[in-house]
Image (cartoon, coloured by chain):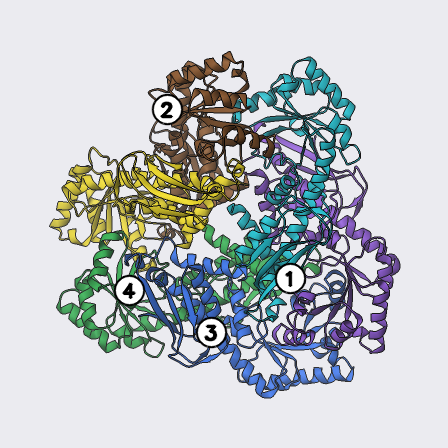
Chain colours: A cyan, B purple, C blue, D green, E brown, F yellow
Amino acid sequence: MNPLIKDRLMDYLKEDVGFGDLTSNLILEDLEAKAIIIVKEDCIIAGLEEAKSLLELLGCKLKPFFKDGEYVKANSIVAEVRGKAKILLMVERTLLNLLMRMSGVATVTRRAVDLVKDINAKVKVACTRKTLPGFRIFDKRAVEIGGGDTHRLRLDDCILIKDNHLKLLSLELAIKKAKEKVSFTKKIEVEVSNKDEAVKAAKLGADIIMVDNFTPEGIKEVVDELKKLNLRDKVILEASGKINFENIKDYALSGVDVISLGFITHSARAIDFSMELS
Amino acid sequence: MNPLIKDRLMDYLKEDVGFGDLTSNLILEDLEAKAIIIVKEDCIIAGLEEAKSLLELLGCKLKPFFKDGEYVKANSIVAEVRGKAKILLMVERTLLNLLMRMSGVATVTRRAVDLVKDINAKVKVACTRKTLPGFRIFDKRAVEIGGGDTHRLRLDDCILIKDNHLKLLSLELAIKKAKEKVSFTKKIEVEVSNKDEAVKAAKLGADIIMVDNFTPEGIKEVVDELKKLNLRDKVILEASGKINFENIKDYALSGVDVISLGFITHSARAIDFSMELS
Amino acid sequence: MNPLIKDRLMDYLKEDVGFGDLTSNLILEDLEAKAIIIVKEDCIIAGLEEAKSLLELLGCKLKPFFKDGEYVKANSIVAEVRGKAKILLMVERTLLNLLMRMSGVATVTRRAVDLVKDINAKVKVACTRKTLPGFRIFDKRAVEIGGGDTHRLRLDDCILIKDNHLKLLSLELAIKKAKEKVSFTKKIEVEVSNKDEAVKAAKLGADIIMVDNFTPEGIKEVVDELKKLNLRDKVILEASGKINFENIKDYALSGVDVISLGFITHSARAIDFSMELS
Amino acid sequence: MNPLIKDRLMDYLKEDVGFGDLTSNLILEDLEAKAIIIVKEDCIIAGLEEAKSLLELLGCKLKPFFKDGEYVKANSIVAEVRGKAKILLMVERTLLNLLMRMSGVATVTRRAVDLVKDINAKVKVACTRKTLPGFRIFDKRAVEIGGGDTHRLRLDDCILIKDNHLKLLSLELAIKKAKEKVSFTKKIEVEVSNKDEAVKAAKLGADIIMVDNFTPEGIKEVVDELKKLNLRDKVILEASGKINFENIKDYALSGVDVISLGFITHSARAIDFSMELS
Amino acid sequence: MNPLIKDRLMDYLKEDVGFGDLTSNLILEDLEAKAIIIVKEDCIIAGLEEAKSLLELLGCKLKPFFKDGEYVKANSIVAEVRGKAKILLMVERTLLNLLMRMSGVATVTRRAVDLVKDINAKVKVACTRKTLPGFRIFDKRAVEIGGGDTHRLRLDDCILIKDNHLKLLSLELAIKKAKEKVSFTKKIEVEVSNKDEAVKAAKLGADIIMVDNFTPEGIKEVVDELKKLNLRDKVILEASGKINFENIKDYALSGVDVISLGFITHSARAIDFSMELS
Amino acid sequence: MNPLIKDRLMDYLKEDVGFGDLTSNLILEDLEAKAIIIVKEDCIIAGLEEAKSLLELLGCKLKPFFKDGEYVKANSIVAEVRGKAKILLMVERTLLNLLMRMSGVATVTRRAVDLVKDINAKVKVACTRKTLPGFRIFDKRAVEIGGGDTHRLRLDDCILIKDNHLKLLSLELAIKKAKEKVSFTKKIEVEVSNKDEAVKAAKLGADIIMVDNFTPEGIKEVVDELKKLNLRDKVILEASGKINFENIKDYALSGVDVISLGFITHSARAIDFSMELS
C-alpha cells in the first residue's frame, strides 16, 4: 500500500476516536463480530479498496462484493466485514465517511463522463485542485474510479499559468521562463481568456491551453483558428468554467480535448451507506 | 490559535504544494502583491478567521471585511490580502478551498436553522460525525458559524448507544454499564427505533434520546407518552434520519429539542470564491 | 487498538532508544529469550494491556498472569515475555516505566475509592487534568482501572467555568452563553466558592457544581439548601480541593456525588517492577 | 530553543486542548489579560524557562520573578503572564502541569543533593532512566536544575551492562565486545552484584562500576579492594538500589562517586502552583 | 517559505541536537555572537537561501554575500550570521552540512552543464531520482542552482516505463494504458535499449524517449531514423547510462535533447565550509 | 527493529512515492514477482539489513546472499526479493538509493580502516557529524559496517569543546564547567591547535584530545610530551583535519589512537546497484 494512504487513513481514524470509543468500550473485549456494508442509493462505488486497507490496518477483514468503479444498485450489500466487535464499531464512522465521500465523487464524475461519452468518447472529463483539504489523494482517486482525469495533483506537478500570474508577467515571458527553468518532464499549461491569447499561447509552445469561461461557440472559433494555423495538433485544449450538466454536451461538441469541472470534487453529494452488525 | 488548527492548515498547504509551486516560482522573488478575495454567490461566510491564520503563518496578512457568520451578497469583496506575490499565489488554492467548504457548510446549516427558527427558536439544528475525513475541526466550526450545534466531536465525547450496540448488549445493560464505567461528566444518549424503547431509555436515565427515522407524528406520540410519565423534562429529544428541507418544519413542530442532519456536512455544496491580484 | 495508544507507545520507545540500544546490540542478533515481569510491592496492577500492545508492536509476546485492576502481592510474577533478546532488553525500561506509573496511579486511586466506598458506594472518586504532560491517555486509563472516574479528558470535553473565567464574565452570562453556544451533548460544570454561588449555579441550570475548597460542613449546608429548593436531584455535586486520605471519609459523608483528587495523578508514587531474563 | 522542546510543548498543549477550549471560547475574542503564577509550597522552582517558551509559542509573555533552581517560599508570585485571556486560560493547565512536575523533581533532587553535600560535596546524585514516558527531556532538565546528574539520556548514550545482559554473555566478553564495537567516545558502565565482579570489571577496564543493592559497608569493601589494587582512580563508582533519605548519608560516606536514585523522577511529588487572573 | 522545507530543516536540526547541545550549553545564556561562513574551495555555491531560512527559524540572522548559483573562490566569506552564541553553535553543523552537500551537487552539475554548453547550449543536463534519501527537495534544488534539470521529482510525477515494467507488459500495452489511465497533464517517457524500440515508442506517441546505455553513435542512428520518419520533433530524446566527464561532449554532439546523470546527486563530493565566531 | 529506523525508511519511501507510482499502477494489481539485486562494482556491502526491513514493512520479502560488511565482487547477486510486482517497482529506487549510499560509505571506510590496520591495528578510524542531513542513523551504521567508529552521534552525546567555544570561554573554564554541569557518563573531548594546548587539556582532565590540523610530526611531539608527563595513558588522542588516503599511514604511525575523517560520510561515492525483475 502507498505509505501516504496508510498515514492518512490512520489520521482520519485518530481524528474520530480520540482517547477511545467510550460506547464500544462497553462491549466485551473479545467478542468477535461480522457486519455488512449496505449502500442506500444507486451509485458508482468507490473506496472499497481503501476501506479494505483501513480494516486490515486494525486487524479486521473486509470482503468486497463489488469492485471500485462498478455501478451498484440501492440496498446492495457491498461488503462484509469481520473482526472484534469493539474495533468494527470504533472504525464504522470513518469507514462509512470514506465510502460516502469517494462514492459521491465517483458517481458525479461518472455522470459527467457518460454525458460526454455520448458525444465524443475521446473527450476527457477532469477534476481540479478544488478538493477537500486533507483528502486530495482520495478525491483524485475517486475521480479516477469514476472515469475522470485527475489533472494536476499538486503545484509541483505541471506548470499552469493563470490570470493572476499574467498580471505579474507577460505570457511571452512566463512561457519563456517556464521552458528555461522548469523540467522538460513537465507540461506547460496556460489559462487564456480570449481567442488571441489562445493562439499566442499555442504559437509560444504551450502544451495545454485552458480556455476559461468560454462559450462553446467561442471555443469552436479557437479550434478553427488553431486548425487554420496548423497548431491544433500541437496543443491539448481544456475547457473550464461555468460548465454544468445542462451545457456539458455543448462543450463536448465544441472540439476541446478535456472538460474540467470543479464541482465534481468541491460539491459532490455523499452517497448513503450503512453498516449493520449481524 | 489552537495548535491543532495550525497543524491542519499547514498539512493542507503541504498537500497542495509538494516540492514547490513551479508556476509561481517564475515570479520575481521579492515582488510584493495585494489581492482581493471575492465571493461569487450569496452565502453565510465562514472560514475568514482560519484564512487569516493561514496567511499569518506564512508571513502574509488578511484584512477581513466581514465576520464569520454574516450573510454576504454575491460578488462582495470579503477580504484583502497582502504579502509576497509568490506566497499569495502558492497559498491561493488552499485558502479558497477552505473558504469554499466552510462557507458551504455554514450556508446550508443556516438555511436549516432559519427554517426551524420560524417554527420554534428553541429547537437546535445539529450536525453529525459525517464530516469530511481530516477536516472535522473545520466542518464542526462551520456548523457553529452557521448557527448549528456541533454534536459529538469524537467517539470519546459522549456515550451514544446505537442499534449496532444494541445487537450486542441490551439497552438496560448498556445504560447500566455506561453509568458505572463512564465519567459523570459525559451525557448518555440512546438511539431508539420505536416509542417503547424511547420510554424505556428515558426511564433508565438516558440524558438524550435519539428518535431515529421516526415520522413527525411518531415523535409526537413519544413526546406525549413522556409527558404523561413526567419524563419529558428529564431528557433531550433528538430527531434524526430522513429529514430534509421539505419536511424539517414538520419535525420542528413535533416537539423535539434537536434536529440532526448529516447532509449539512457530508453533502454541503461549496460556495464559489476567487482571489484576484491587483 | 486505539491508534493514539500505538503512536504514544512508539513515541515513548523512540525517546528511550534513540539511534539504538548500544548495550543490547552486543548480543547475538538471533538469540531468542524469555523473561518474567515481577512486581516488588503490593499494588493494583495497571498497564498490562498496554505492555502487551507495546511488545506486540515489536514482534514479541507478553502473557499476563493478572488482569489490569487486580490486587497483586509483592514479588508476584505478573507476566511472561518472549521474543528476541535484543528487543526485550531494548524495550525493558519503557515497558517497566509504563507499568510502574500506571500501577502507581491505579493503586493510589483504589485506596481512595475503597475509603470512600466504606462510607457510600455511590460517591465517585475522580481525577483531574493534572496528569503528566504527554501521558494523559494512560493516566486516565490507570484511574479507570483503579476504579476512579476520568473526569474531563480535554478542554473540548465539557464546560467547566472556573474562578478565572468568572473574573471575566458573570456566572449568569457564562452559563447563558454556554447553553447557547455549546453543544447540547456537553454538560456544564461550574466551580463555586460559597453556598450562594452554588445555589445560583443550580438555579441557572448547571449540570455539575464543583464546590471548591469547602469543608465537609460547608458542603452539607449546600446540600441542605439545594434539597430545600428541590434542586438537589438536578445537579451533580463535586467536591474538590484540599482533600486527602485523612479527611476523604468526611467528604464522602458530606452528601456530594463526586470527590475529585489531583494528587492521584500528579503525585502518584510509582510501583516497583523488574524484568528478569531466564 | 531546542527544537525538540518546542515540539514536546506543543504536543502537550494539543493533548489538553483537542478541538478547542470550550469554556474559554465563551470569552470575548480580543480581551487582553494579565495573570500571576503562584507557588503554594516551599520548593526548588523548575520549568520557568520552559513555561516562558510555551507562552511565547502562543504569542503571550511570561516574566519570571525567579530563576530555575532557586529556593522559593510558599505563596510567592513566581511569574507574571500576559496575553489574550482566551489563550492564557487555554494554556493554564499545561503550563501548571509542567511547573508542578518539574519543580517536584527539582525539589526532591535538591533534598538528596543537600544531604549528600553535607557529607561529601564531591559525591554526585544522579537520576536514572525511570522518567515519565514522553517527558524525559524535562525530567532530566529538572534533575539538573535540582543539582543532580542526568545520567544516561538514552540507550544510545553510553554502555551499561546489566544483570540481564550478563545472563546472555560473560562480563569478559561483554566488555571486550563493547570496546571493539562501540565508539571510543562512549563510556562503559557495568552493574555488579558483588565485590569480585566489581574488581573484575575494574580490571577489564570498565569506566564506571555500578554497585547495585550493596550496603554501605559492602561498598566500602569494594573501595578498599580497588585501592589495594591501585584501581580506585581508574573507575567511577556508582551506588544504586534501595537508597532513600534515611540511608543516603551512609552511602555518601561509603566512598562512592555517584549515588543514583530512581525515585526522584519516578515518584516525585508535584509542587502545587496556581494561576490567578487579575 | 515552502512548508515542506521548514519541516525538513527542523528535522535535520533535531537529528543533530537531540536533548541539547551539551557543549554550547556551557556558554552564557544571553551572549550574542557573530560569525562568518567561509568556503574552503572554489565552487558553485548553493544552499544559502536554505541556510538563511534555517537561521531565521531559530531567531538568528544570516546575511549572504553571494547568491545561490554564483561561482565563489576558495576562502571567500560567503555569509555573516548573528544570534545567540549558543544557538549559532548548536546549528553550526546542520548549517554547514546543508551548504557542503548542496554546493557539492551544484558544483558538479555546473561542470557538466558547462561541458555540454560548449557543444550545444540547447542540450539540458538532468539529474535522476538517485538522490540521498530524505534530502530530495534540496538535492533537486541544488541541481537547479547548478543549471541542471530536476527531472522527475517523484513517482507520481510523470510516467517512465522502464525495462522492469516492460518485462511485465508490452510497450504497446504500457503506452496504451498510460494514455488511458494517466492524466493528460503528465508526459509519458519510455526507456528503450535499441533503435527499433526507440522508433516504436516514438510511433506510439511517447513524449520522451530515454536511450539507455547507448553509445553516442547509437544515438545518432536513432536520431537519423526518427528524422527520416518525421518523428524527431515529436519526441524529447534523453541519453542516460555510463555518461561521465570524459564522454559527455560526445553525447552532447549526438543529437539528444537531454543528458541525465545519476552521479551528480548520488556521488557528489561535498564542498568544504566552516563557521568562525568573531 | 529500532522504531526510528522504521520511521525513516517510511519517510524516504513517502518522499519518492507521493500520491502513487503512476507507472507501476499500470501493472495488474495482483501480479506477484521476483527480482534480484545486483551490485555493479566491487564493494563492502552495507544496507542489506535495512533493505530487508524496508521490504518487510511493505509485505514483501528479501533474501540476502551476503552479510552487511562482506566484500562483494562486481556483478554479484546480493539478494533476491519477492512480492507484488507493483510494490517491488514502487520501492525499487528507495531500496537501491539506500544500498548505494550505505555501501559507498562502508566501502570508503573499509579502505581507510585497512590502510590504518596495515600500520597499527589498534588505531581506530572514525567518522564525524558531517553526515547527510536526515540520514545520520544510516550513515553512522554504514561506517560501523565498514569497520569504523561512529564517534559522536549527536550534540547531546559527549562534550566536544572546539575552537569556536574557546573564543567564548577559556579552556580551563570550559573543562571546569563541563565537569560540574555535565553527566559523569559523558566523556569530555577538547579540540586543540598546538602542543601546549594539548598538554594543558590533558592536565585538566580531558578524556579525549583532538589534535586538529596537525602534521604527523606535530602529533609525535604531542605524544612524546604527554608520555614525558605521564599523561599519555590518561587520554585518547584523535587526529583530525586534512587527512586523506595519501597521508593516512603517516598519521597511523604518529602515535594517535583515533583518526577521524569527514569525507567518508560527506563525500562517499555511491556504489552502483540495480534490481532486475525475472
Q: Secondary structure at mark 3?
A: helix
Q: Residue F196: horizontal and vertical position, in percent?
A: 20, 44
Which chain does the numbered disc 2 sit on? Answer: E
Asked if badge 4 and badge 1 are on a common chain, one would say: no
Along the polypeptide, which appears first: circle 1 or circle 3?
3
Residue under pointer 3: C103
Q: CA distance from mark 3 to mark 4?
A: 26 Å
Q: Mark 2 against mark 4, which lies toward the viewer?
A: 2
D48 or B218: nearer the eye? B218
Residue under pointer 4: D165
Question: Given the image, on which type of amino acid does mark 3 rest?
Answer: Ser
D218 or F42: nearer the eye? F42
Which chain does the numbered disc 4 sit on? Answer: D
Q: Mark 3 against mark 2, which lies toward the viewer?
A: 2
Say few, some or many: other residues with alpha carbon within 10 Å of mark 4 (under 14 / 14 to 19 / 20 or more).
many
Q: Quadrant of residue D215?
A: bottom left
Q: Secondary structure at mark 1?
A: loop
Q: CA distance from mark 2 to mark 4?
A: 52 Å
Residue under pointer 1: C156
Q: Residue D74: horizontal and vertical position, in percent?
A: 51, 72
Residue under pointer 2: E243
Q: Secondary structure at mark 2?
A: loop
Question: Given the image, on which type of amino acid does mark 1 rest?
Answer: Asp
